[in-house]
Structures are given as C-alpha cells and as structure tokens.
Image (cartoon, rainbow, N blue to C red):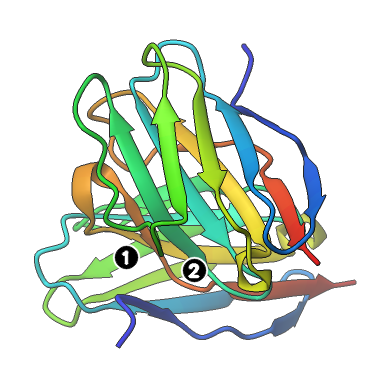
Amino acid sequence: RKEVEQDPGPFNVPEGATVAFNCTYSNSASQSFFWYRQDCRKEPKLLMSVYSSGNEDGRFTAQLNRASQYISLLIRDSKLSDSATYLCVVIGGPGYALNFGKGTSLLVTP
Amino acid sequence: GAGVSQSPSNKVTEKGKDVELRCDPISGHTALYWYRQRLGQGLEFLIYFQGNSAPDKSGLPSDRFSAERTGGSVSTLTIQRTQQEDSAVYLCASSVEGTGGEQYFGPGTRLTVT
C-alpha cells in the first residue's frame, strides 16, 4: 500500500465551481501535511500547509482528520489558472523528506 | 533571490553510460533533497543531505545511484550504467533547516535513456 493515496482524476469543472480533493495516508505517526501544486512539466510548488484545526487561504481550504488519516483540499470559485495537478504531501520519511501522492489533476474550463 | 537551479535541463544518453546531474540549492539552505518523477507517476524520494551529517540514502533504488554534496552547497547525482527505467525527471529541492515541508524545487533534469 502506498503511503499517500489520491484520486488521480481528472476533475473537469467549469469556472466558478467548487471542487474538493481527498487524500489518505498510511503512517499514523505522520506529523506534517501539505498540498503542493504542479503545473504541466514544471516543478512542484507549495500551495499550503494543512493544520489540525483546518486552515484557509483565500479560495483554498485545507482540512486534516487524524483519526481517519485523511486530508482534503477545497477550492471555491475555481479559476482557469487553477488548472494543475494537486499533490498531497506527508512528511513521514527521514529528515523531512516528503512523501508525495501521485496527484489529482484538475482542469477548469470556461 | 535566485532559486534552486539544476543542470542540464535535458539529458539524452545511451543505455550503459554514466550521467551526472547537478543541483545548486538556494544560498543558505542547509537541507537538500533529490527526487525522481517518472512519467505519469508521483515523486519518489531518493536522498537527503542535511548540513555536515551523513546523507540519508534510503531512497536510492540501486547501487548504480550515488550523490555527493560538496561544501554544503552544490550537489551531484550520479547514475552509473544507465538503464531505460532510469528515464525520468530528476528534481532537486532545498529547504532551510527545520522548516519541514516548505521545500523549494528546481526545474528538474529530464533524463532519457535510449
């Protein structure tokens, strides 16, 4: 079983829609969680950290459920520029090495 | 300021040849990581350097892979006797010690083994 699992999608949504991505992780001792964004043929970039209490950054909301080992990302009012692959990331390796999910592909259409 | 840089951006090599991939981390970042991303796959951790400590090589897939970091800065990933399954994008990332997940990635080196 992979340490971090995501629905690969693709998710095709119209502009303005709300879309949610889910992620599960297997290591119950994991302490840190993130969402990264990766544009086509580009390097990943940190989108936001995920805190136990849930956190929001503009149109983006991240939540963590430790009991279920589940992380989510909600994007409201989708923009065309949100089209990318969203990577669920868990720190479970040595010295902050990141465990990446395979990513969920989002395509926002006009 | 300057971000993480990697060279070459693309490398095509014949099966059996050795290749060297270079990473220049962000100045002042003490942690450096190498990852591999095969086509359509997620990122795989390869190796991690932190300051002057011995690197963690637990992610290296075989003894054909090795990496060095000189002077706590530039790092080189070497793949000996390349195989077709080594074809991937090799990504380097750096971070300030202790910041955990905020890693800054370079643009990657796309390696194609023919």
**SS at mark 2?**
strand
Chain ID at mark 2 = A
- Position of B31 compared to B78: left or right? left
Looking at the figure, which quarter contains the N terminus of chain A?
A: bottom left
A101, A14: nearer the viewer = A101
Q: Quadrant of residue A93?
A: bottom left
Tag 2 residue = A74
Q: Is residue B15 above or below residue A46?
A: below
Q: Earlier in the sequence, mark 2 or mark 1?
A: 1
Q: Going 44% across and 71% down the picture, which residue do you hit?
A: A101
- Position of A94 compared to A24: left or right? left
Residue A47 point in image, percent of width and height: 51, 48
Q: CA distance from mark 2 to mark 1?
A: 9 Å
Residue B64 point in image, percent of width and height: 47, 56
Q: Going 49% across and 37% down the picture, which residue do you hit?
A: B93
> Is the residue marked by circle 2 packed among few (<14), some (14-19), or many (20+) residues within 10 Å?
some
Q: What residue type is disc 1 on?
A: Gln
Q: Is residue A84 above or below residue A50?
A: below
**SS at mark 1?**
strand
Report the number of discs.
Answer: 2
Tag 1 residue = A63
Do we see residue B100 in this rendering? Answer: yes
User: Mark 2 near mark 1, Cβ–Cβ under 8 Å?
Assistant: yes
Residue A45 point in image, percent of width and height: 56, 45
A67, B48: nearer the viewer = B48
Looking at the figure, which quarter contains the C terminus of chain A?
A: bottom right
Q: Going 43% across and 44% down the picture, which residue do you hit?
A: B66
Q: Going 11% across and 72% down the picture, which residue do you hit?
A: A28
Residue B34 point in image, percent of width and height: 46, 44
Q: Is residue A30 above or below residue B48?
A: below
- Position of A29 compared to B91: left or right? left
